[in-house]
Image (tube, grey):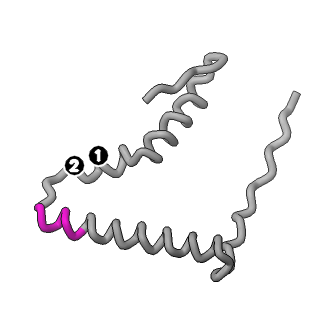
Amino acid sequence: MQVFVRDNNIDQALKVLKKKMQREGVFREMKQRKAYEKPSERRVREEAEAVRRARKNARKAAQREGLLPKRPAKPRPAPAARAT
């Protein structure tokens, strides 16, 4: 994984890196590996994740086809004005 630092802005680069790691599931995997997980528990967890993914995909497909209403977008805060 690679992140470029622009204009010596380390904070922005860290923010981008954390977002990429979150998207890739690195933090979730680290948390799971802290303790041993029995194979039966792992199987149950993976099946539950698969069911969750399938439901999400079905919901999104139904929304695309117009069978379900789309969720309203979350309101974004207005960007703060810069003091110059």
- Label 1 Cα neighbours within 10 Å, binned few <14 / some 14-19 / many ≥20: few
Where does the magenta region start and end? 39-44
Amino acid identity at mark 2: Arg
Q: Please tell me which residue is depicted at 51% across the width and 26% down the height of the picture.
A: 3
- Label 2 Cα neighbours within 10 Å, binned few <14 / some 14-19 / many ≥20: few
Q: Specify whether residue 37 is painted magenta.
A: no
Q: Please tell me which residue is depicted at 49% across the width and 70% down the height of the picture.
A: 56
The C terminus, quarter of image: top right
Which residue is the extreme one toward the bottom?
Answer: 67
Q: Please tell me which residue is depicted at 47% across the width and 26% down the height of the picture.
A: 2
Q: Looking at the rendering, which quadrant does residue 77 occupy?
A: bottom right
Where residue 12 appears, as percent x and y from the top left, is: 60, 31
Residue 33: image tag: 2
User: Is 84 on the left-hand or right-hand side of 48?
Assistant: right
22 vs 39: above or below:
above
Cα distance in 3D space between marks 2 and 1: 5 Å
76 vs 73: above or below:
above
| Residue at numbered disc 1 | 30
54 vs 12: above or below:
below
Amino acid identity at mark 1: Met
Q: Looking at the rendering, which quadrant does residue 65 occupy?
A: bottom right
33 vs 18: above or below:
below
Where residue 30 appears, as percent x and y from the top left, is: 29, 46
